[in-house]
Amino acid sequence: MEAITQSGTAVAEEDLVASEYLTFTLGSEEYAIDILKVQEIRGYEQPTLIANSPSFIKGVINLRGIIVPIVDLRIKFNLGKIEYTPFTVVIILNIAGRVIGAVVDSVSDVMSLTRSQIRPAPDFSGNFDTKYIIGLASQDSRMMIVTDIERLMSSADMELIDSATE
Amino acid sequence: MAIDMSQFYQVFFDESAEHLAAMEGLLLDLDIENPDSEQLNAIFRAAHSIKGSAGTFGFTDLAETTHILENLLDRIRKQELGLRADMVDAFLECGDRLREMLEAHQGRGEAVDQAAVESICARLRDLSTDRQPELPDQAKLAPESLTPSSLDKRVFDIQFVPTEVSAKGDGVTSLLDELRSLGQLEILSQPAGDIHNVGYWQVRLISDLGQEAFADQIDFIAENGAWRVVEGKLSAGDSDPAFGFFDDSPGVPDENQSYGFFAPLDASPDVGGAVAKEVEDEGFGFFEPLPATTAPQVTPEGGNGEAEDGYGFFAPLAPPEKAPEVLEEGDGFGFFVPVPAPAASAAPLVIMPSPVAALDSSSAAAVPEKSAVESRTRAAKTAAPAAAAGDSSIRVSIEKVDQLINLVGELVITQAMLLQTATQMQESAPERLVNGLAQLERNTRDLQESVMSIRMMPISFVFSRFPRVVRDLSGKLGKQVELKTSGETTELDKSLIERIADPLTHLIRNSLDHGIELPDKRIAAGKNPVGTITLKAYHQGGNIVIEVGDDGGGLPRNKILAKARERGFQVSDQMTDSEVFNLIFEAGFSTADQVTDVSGRGVGMDVVRRNIQSMGGRVEIESMLGVGTRMTVRLPLTLAILDGMSIAVGDQTYILPLSYVIESFQPRTGDIKTLSNQARVIQVRGEYLPVVVLHELFNIKPKASDFTQGIMVVIDADGIKAALFVDALVGQHQVVIKSLEANYRRVQGISGATIMGDGHVALILDVSAIAGMAKTSMQKAG
């Protein structure tokens, strides 16, 4: 009995621990990713084209001496208008020891979400496989898709890594 | 205070490996007939350093083996033993065992073969003892020759304070065991409580051996200089044995007058503790020799006080006979006077303390000054040739250097951007700004060159291991071989140095085993029975060229062809020599009639070629039957920098490694012909080359759609030639190679990336892959 209560409170405590998420928009959808994976945010610059690469891989840029590939998530997920304005944002991610840039429409804000605030997403099929979705979070009238960005970026779908496992 | 020693292990491993390498080099250089004492000393020092640090870090197996090695070396360098060829062999083998132990401690390599270690230790011990009885008399030390009764049991009072490391470990216990093995051991005092406590030890050893038999071990266990051995005699009739050492120096007391700073110190046994204090108080600058009048009952305090307070003040305490040696190794020659201690058991010594001190100080002062000068000059002399690399260098982790290189790369880019901006300002740029920028450009270029040179190492680091390889192998194969090297100072990137060693070793072994014939066969062929292997390194263009040549039998073309057919390779008699010879790089190919443990299994040459290619290099063979073979390895100077030609295709810029570029020209209408309306070829200097259209390959919209508007660049990748069609040539740059795979993945036709002056990324073309693509498209067409 007691053990159960204890584990119950433990879960509750864990639920209260809030993690910070960076939210960004792709078209009309709002996404949230673990802020600890984000290295920096910068403006879009024309990358160097990589021949024969998928269309969503825009190329590589020079980030202070490091060659960083740039992925346009809007192209990958077929969202929003693909245009590059001075306000187009690149989120530089640090994933599995690699540095990768992701093009998004805009970055909204940073918010704290507890585990209990993230609800499981219903299964659906589409461009964006549910296995990359941790859950859905809502705040006010907004719904954010909490994404496992590490799993997404290191997946074979993204064609970013030679020996991708999935 | 417990210090975590493991953080220093890597330094120890590195240093010991270097010492071993230095030792091996010196041993191989050694002229056995007439050994150079400086070289012997250098070898000894290398062994001694390994022993010292191995002991400090608690690697007792290493320390013990080196100790035995060092004993023999010590005797040789003191000319007590003559150097013989078998000794050198034993030393070399011992070096190998030590290296194995080091590797085992580092957790790589195989487990150490204990039997081999023991056998080499036994061999070294035999070598160091077998001629001991024939020692020339003059080499013996004064007390022994003066006292004919030296066969008497000798009594040593040994006092020491062990280092923390050796006390905590088994150092002290093993020392005591060792002493017990030498004779009768009595422990007079030991630290309170546990044997592993750091503290003062006093033991008495009765043995018929000299103190040199154990002095080293104590030196090794004890804190710097915090030990002494006092020798007495069991024969009670000799009332004053310690003074017997100086019987032959009558004039000494007079000399003493000139050494003003040595004040004879009156001391008696019952003030032992006070003596130490007094000395310490007065002990600025120069030190009174301390006649250690340590009667057993007072030493615990007195001796302890000395040992603890007196670091650096007192040289290792030793009887006069030992003084010169101790000083060479010691901490402070010149300033510190070794303190000869009269036997503690000699009660009458109280009677005449000042003559003792006078004698001591004069003899001791004379000796250290001389030996200090000697050892310094000697150190200076040996440092120049042998330790040139070690003396004035610091050890820096490669990451730090790489970080520095990256930062400088950034600086160069920033500087280029500034310059570009200034150029765009044209007239409006103030002259001072333009001048400043020009100077900045020069400075950054110099800086970049210097930083790049940090990673460069002379190839002698690799070459130096080959005399040994050749020596061992030629002995094993019964061949007589001389190794000639040249161009050892040619510099190469460190990472290349590390990676070229194995392929080169393989090529040399191959030359030795298959190239050089046996002596009688050589004589029959009218050649010098001693074969020659030449190892040459030099710069050529942007490459480093390493040649491994031999004057052996050469490669048998027919045999290779026959073997190739046997193995089912596609061959024909029309193949050129170089194509035939290249077959030996195929996996599983060997023409050796029998498999030896040196080579012949057919693994190896393919690995050699693969390794060299992975370094961006290539290997070529030239051979003439009966005359010899020459393998030429071409490597890029460094992995980090490349001489490149920038080319434009559409709005993209690519870098073409300059070493692959042969020529470029603008094609005229009609130059390009088609084969079966698919593959295009162009005739260049009588050769039809496949045309690779880069914008088609990379799916880029070109500026020059017609061949006559663009440029053809003829490339040669490992013998495959092709003409690359691009829009325009932009310029020539030295580019820093960046990995594309670090954050992305391999891209076909691209070997890496670099950052251009304007901060943009340019991709570096993989010429071999592109030439390969041309070939496959030709085959498809043909």
Image (spheres, coloured by chain):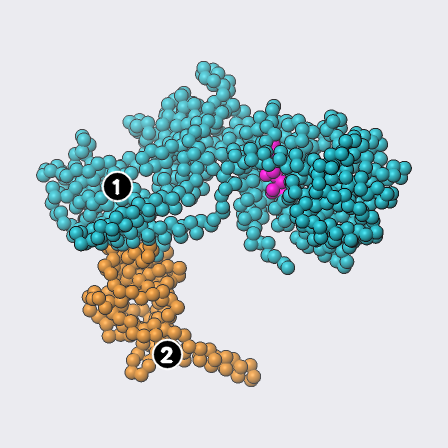
Chain colours: A orange, B cyan
Q: Is B641 placed left or right of B328 in the picture?
A: left
Q: What residue lies at 17% left-to-right and 45% top-to-bottom?
A: B728
Q: Which residue is mark 1?
A: B771
Question: Between residues A162 and B731, which one lies in front from this camera angle?
Answer: B731
Q: Quadrant of the N terminus of chain B?
A: bottom right
Q: What residue lies at 49% left-to-right and 19% top-to-bottom?
A: B529
Q: Dot 2: what SS?
A: strand
Image coords of residue A156 (percent x, y): 33, 60
Q: Which residue is mark 2?
A: A119
Disc 1 marks which amino acid? Ala
B46 within the magenta span: yes
Q: What residue lies at 36% left-to-right and 66% top-to-bottom?
A: A38
Q: Is B145 placed left or right of B731 in the picture?
A: right
Q: Quadrant of residue B662?
A: top left
Question: Between residues A84 and A58, which one lies in front from this camera angle?
Answer: A84
**Count of marks, rendered view:** 2
Label 2 packing within 10 angstroms: few (<14), some (14-19), many (20+): some
Answer whether residue B543 is visible to the viewer in this image.
Answer: yes
Magenta: main secondary structure equals helix
Disc 2 marks which amino acid? Arg
- Part of the protein shown in magenta: B40-51
Q: Quadrant of the C terminus of chain B?
A: top left
> In the displayed structure, would residue A98 be above or below residue B45?
below
> In the displayed structure, would residue B585 be above or below residue B189?
above
Q: CA distance from mark 2 to mark 1?
A: 55 Å
Q: Are marks 2 and 1 on the same chain?
A: no
